């Protein structure tokens, strides 16, 4: 690995500094007015507003981990014992206390009777099965069936020595009443919603989903399905970013594709911005002659700058008519990298959703080179052996390589060369 600790491009903003600026821009989305209380299933993918304390313990009572016999462990010292069978304990019932010298057939999840402190699995009992019910559904634990519909519980069962606590799920062993169940800011996935349901909580207060106005720009861009005239390309940015944003929990409103006429872009923005929490444009943010977003933002508090990142260096940030604004580059890979590096983490920080990308470490299966002064983000595929295979080259137009990737590979600024086998940070896509 070759590194240059002072490698920072002149006049370029660092990735960390721009990420912090985007997070600060979106702070207005974190406010008490932007919350709502929803039934659990409607809160999927949202961020929890307040800490949630457990109103009950889980499990709420000691229960059996197995089908078997609830016993007093003290009755089964040494080589075990023959215990008299008492009426069974089905799940959902409230059992009678267990007397010394007895065993109660118990089902998985059923409440442990008072006095019992262990469960012997049915396969360790002699006989190793419960009696079959007779024609009228009644069971006699002596091995005979009474035809008058009643059962005789005077049978016995031989059970081995068993330690106290065996196959008993103690009350509160998962979480005790009053303990914090979920922290504020938690992104609510199936497991978190399942926990709330298990605690008897039917609804939860979450951050409202942000609405983003998404605008693709460029005279050369046409919608998929139209005829492709010479010099034209199909718009992939709109679909790519809308899908990423929807997956991240945003409500997306797209405009028509804007030409490179600043007046047309301004009209689209002014029509859509009053109902948006955020505006994102693609293209028109570099220093060329036809940078329509730069032109349209004249007079607005918007800064156009270069971030020390490849791809995705040109960026715009500020507000348009008071609405937070982000201008992403026009190349499709640059768009997605910009979203993952800047917008997604900011949404996670201020709304609790989407869940942040957790960094992993993987070994390169090939060498790579990176510009000294830039944080390079390459596309790759994580392999079953823990290595990562790079997909495509450095180009920001390589959509096929992006579609074949499942991770973003990070090479920090200052690192110029990595060898095969070197570890890198990757983010799962």
Image (tube, rainbow, N blue to C red):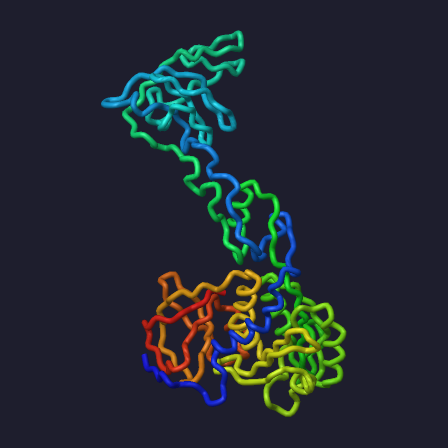
Residue 64: image quadrant is top left
The reply, left or right, for residue 395 in relation to residue 299 is left
Image: 1 above or below 156: below
Tell me which residue sits at (48%, 12%) in the image: 151
Image: 265 above or below 175: below
Image: 159 above or below 24: above
The reply, left or right, for residue 65 in relation to residue 212 is left
Q: Position of residue 248 (x, y in %)?
A: 58, 63
Q: Position of residue 6 (x, y in %)?
A: 38, 85
Q: Nearer the viewer, residue 401 or 100?
A: 100
The answer, for residue 79, to whether it is visible in the render is yes
Tell me which residue sits at (35%, 17%) in the image: 100
Tell me which residue sits at (54%, 13%) in the image: 136
Tell me which residue sits at (52%, 50%) in the image: 192
Return the residue found at the far left: 78
Q: How many marks?
A: 0
The N terminus - image quarter? bottom left
The answer, for residue 220, to whether it is visible in the render is no
Q: Position of residue 384 (x, y in %)?
A: 38, 61
Q: Position of residue 160 (x, y in %)?
A: 29, 24
């Amino acid at each position: 690995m070759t590194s240059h600790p002072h490698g920072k491009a002149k006049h370029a903003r660092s990735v960390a500094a721009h990420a912090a600026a985007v997070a600060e821009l979106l702070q207005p989305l974190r406010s008490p007015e932007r919350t709502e209380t929803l039934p659990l299933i409607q809160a999927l993918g949202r961020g929890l507003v307040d800490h949630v304390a457990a109103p009950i313990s889980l499990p709420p009572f000691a229960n059996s981990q197995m089908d078997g016999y609830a016993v007093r462990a003290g009755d089964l010292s040494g080589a075990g014992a023959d215990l008299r069978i008492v009426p069974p304990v089905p799940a959902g019932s409230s059992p009678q206390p267990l007397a010394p010298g007895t065993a109660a057939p118990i089902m998985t999840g059923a409440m442990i009777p008072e006095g019992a402190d262990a469960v012997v699995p049915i396969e360790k009992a002699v006989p190793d099965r419960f009696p079959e019910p007779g024609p009228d559904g009644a069971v006699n634990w002596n091995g005979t069936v009474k035809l008058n519909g009643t059962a005789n519980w005077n049978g016995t069962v031989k059970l081995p020595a068993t330690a106290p606590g065996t196959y008993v799920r103690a009350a509160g062993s998962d979480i005790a009443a009053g303990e914090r169940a979920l922290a504020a800011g938690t992104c609510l996935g199936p497991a978190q919603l399942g926990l709330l349901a298990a605690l008897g909580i039917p609804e939860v207060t979450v951050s409202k989903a942000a609405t983003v106005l998404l605008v693709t720009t460029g005279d050369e861009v046409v919608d998929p399905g139209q005829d492709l005239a010479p010099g034209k390309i199909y718009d992939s940015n709109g679909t790519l970013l809308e899908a990423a944003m929807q997956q991240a929990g945003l409500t997306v409103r797209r405009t028509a594709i804007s030409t490179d006429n600043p007046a047309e872009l301004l009209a689209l923005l002014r029509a859509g911005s009053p109902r948006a929490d955020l505006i994102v444009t693609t293209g028109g943010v570099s220093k060329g002659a036809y940078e329509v977003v730069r032109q349209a933002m004249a007079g607005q508090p918007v800064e156009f700058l270069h971030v020390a990142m490849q791809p995705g260096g040109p960026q715009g940030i500020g507000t348009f008519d008071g609405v937070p604004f982000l201008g992403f580059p026009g190349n499709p890979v640059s768009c997605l990298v910009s979203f993952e590096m800047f917008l997604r983490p900011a949404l996670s920080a201020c709304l609790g959703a989407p869940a942040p990308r957790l960094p992993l470490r993987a070994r390169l299966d090939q060498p790579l080179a990176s510009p000294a002064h830039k944080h390079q983000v390459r596309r790759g595929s994580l392999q079953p052996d823990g290595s990562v295979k790079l997909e495509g080259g450095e180009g920001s137009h390589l959509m096929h390589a992006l579609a074949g990737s499942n991770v973003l590979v990070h090479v920090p600024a200052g690192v110029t060369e990595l060898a095969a086998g070197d570890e890198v940070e990757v983010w799962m896509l």
